[in-house]
Image: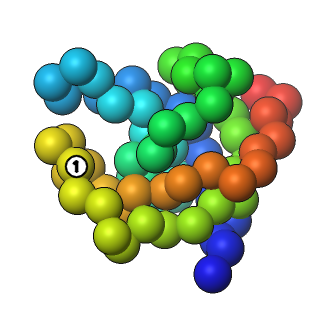
Amino acid sequence: MSIEAKGTITFQSFGLGVWALAAKDVTYELFEPPTELQQEGLSVNITGIIRDDIMTVAMIGPVLEVQSFEISGS
């Protein structure tokens, strides 16, 4: 099932680093995010799937696989 999340892109320096979406109530760890999303401080709306079948080193929150996204104005 797809979800929609709105927030800010952050870079967390765990191991080699991980890109995340800091939403209002939760931080999502982005699974293989597109290059366009790999920008600290970017405001975005993301549609994606929560991947319960993946474990990560960072374990900062649910793993979100991006299906589509829209960059928001600041």
Residue 49 drawn at (x, y percent) = 57, 67
The residue drawn where x is 49% and y is 38% is 32
The residue drawn where x is 49% and y is 56% is 64
Q: Amino acid at mark 1?
A: Thr
Residue 58 drawn at (x, y percent) = 19, 42
Closer to the camera in the image, 34 or 22: 34
Residue 15 drawn at (x, y percent) = 15, 24
Camera sees residue 6: no
**SS label for mark 1:** loop
Camera sees residue 41: yes
> Disc 1 marks which residue?
56
Above or below, 22 relative to 9: below
Query: Coloured how?
Result: rainbow
**In which quadrant is the N terminus drawn?**
bottom right
The residue drawn where x is 42% and y is 32% is 19
Q: Report whether 41 appears left or right of 14.
A: right
Residue 65 drawn at (x, y percent) = 54, 54
**In which quadrant is the C terminus drawn?**
top right
Q: Report whether 42 appears left or right of 63.
A: right
The residue drawn where x is 65% and y is 71% is 3
